[in-house]
Image: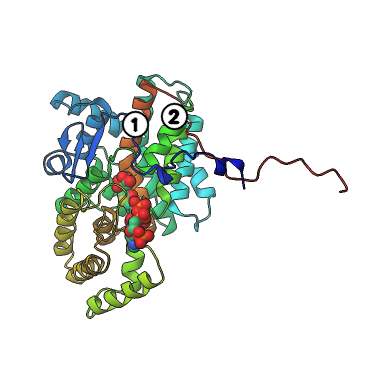
Amino acid sequence: MSDTTSQQQPEIYKGLAGVPVDYTAISKVNSDTNSLLYRGYPVQQLAASVTFEEVAYLLWNGDLPNAQQLGAFEDLERSHRGLDHEVKRIIDELPLTAHPMDVVRTAVSVIGASDPKTPDDSREANLDKAVRLFAKLPSIVTYDQRRRHELEFVEPRDDLGYSANFLWQAFGETPELEVVNAFDVSMILYAEHSFNASTFTARVIASTLSDLYSAVTGAVGALKGALHGGANEAVMHAFDEIGPGPGSAERAAAWLDTALAEKRKIMGFGHRVYKHGDSRVPTMRDALERMVEHYDRPDLLELYVALEQGMEERKGIKPNLDYPAGPTYHLMGFDTETFTPLFVASRVTGWTAHIMEQLASNALIRPLSVYNGPDERPVPARGA
Ligand SMILES: CC(=O)SCCNC(=O)CCNC(=O)[C@H](O)C(C)(C)COP(=O)(O)OP(=O)(O)OC[C@H]1O[C@@H](n2cnc3c(N)ncnc32)[C@H](O)[C@@H]1OP(=O)(O)O
Ligand SMILES: O=C([O-])CC(=O)C(=O)O
């Protein structure tokens, strides 16, 4: 035991829980009022009245675009949607069994390796990189989903908005307006959430004066984990295990009892900051309900409600955004393993806004640790 244990110990904030580490002007998560503001605007109002493109512009620039700014921004985004042959070739080299998050992480890295602007860390160059990634992620995600089904890549269409085009590229059919709206709402809700684990990862990497693509690549790795973005995929695995349809409420109760007895975390429930429910869930649940009606799948909503009630009764723990998002993406037809890459496509806006904010007033992020290993000791003599 180290001699530090006998001295006065500094307090350790495991997981940095409750520790403010910097200012941000990008979003405000308020667990007391159960609210979330992007640059001052309530996220529910944004979801009801603007597009995801406008939210991306807002996060990066601080204000919503006027009509002229939006037109120019949409033209720019649409001009970057295509995927270079090199990116497709490298994705094709990856095994079909690779997790789609690994594919996305690799593709972001490849784009960074071939962009001549990568070392330029001016705000202008970083904004350009952010728009490129934002525009290309739908192509990356859908290219991979389709290759796993041995389907041809669907080229982007520049007569469609971001979300309509995303669904077009995923399924090769012009999507219905209701589905586009629900998808756009999910993209808006997933876009930004202050110093969550993946955003913090991006800021740590940016703080070393590494480049934006490296920071986003690291953030994708952090988001993959089941305690963070990977939970939307895990929610659907739980739904599959329980099975929707007649008797799902009883099955959900039995499944929960077993899972909790085995001390398993129930994915899609709980949150580090929100302790009275996630501010985004009611809006996402509305979108889910619209999709349940659209696709005529009341059985899925019954299972959703059963598990939610079961968690409330047993643990008093409420769902987070991943809980309604998972079954919504399932209804739309996405593969379960593609759900977290959809989160990436949205959160890349928040990550890159934070990378630029970090660089605008940078300090290397380097906390302290308290050593609790062996006391100092000599290296044993050779042959002893
Ligand atoms: C978009 C997002 O990234 S939202 C987060 C998505 N992640 C998930 O859905 C994964 C499941 N949830 C969890 O693991 C947690 O709630 C976290 C990681 C999100 C937050 O965790 P923390 O703030 O560290 O809370 P912590 O894990 O300490 O939980 C406090 C207590 O609630 C319990 N608890 C919290 N969440 C859950 C859960 N989902 N299932 C079962 N028990 C839970 C813990 O076991 C712990 O109980 P204990 O005090 O008896 O040990
Ligand atoms: O804030 C968090 O810790 C996780 C979360 O909800 C998000 O990143 O959207």
Cα gap from disc 2 to disc 1, whole angstroms: 9 Å
Q: Earlier in the sequence, mark 2 or mark 1?
A: 2
Q: Amino acid at mark 1?
A: His
| Nearest the eye: 190 or 318 | 318
- Is residue 232 visible in the rendered image? The answer is no
Image position of 359 with respect to 59: above or below: above
Residue 371 as seen in the image, left or right of residue 364: right
Q: Which quadrant of the figure has residue 238?
A: bottom left
Q: Which quadrant of the figure has residue 213?
A: top left
Spot occupied by residue 59 in the image (x, y as percentages of width and height): 25, 31
**Residues at badges 2 and 1 in contact (C-beta under 8 Å)?**
yes
Spot occupied by residue 287 in the image (x, y as percentages of width and height): 17, 54
Q: Residue at x 33, y 43 (%)?
A: 345
- Identify the element where label 2 is drawn: helix
Residue 183 as seen in the image, left or right of residue 349: left
Return the residue at label 2: 206
Spot occupied by residue 68 in the image (x, y as percentages of width and height): 16, 23
Q: Residue at x 61, y 41 (%)?
A: 3
Q: Amino acid at mark 2?
A: Ala
Return the residue at label 1: 354
Quadrant in which ligand 1 is drawn: bottom left
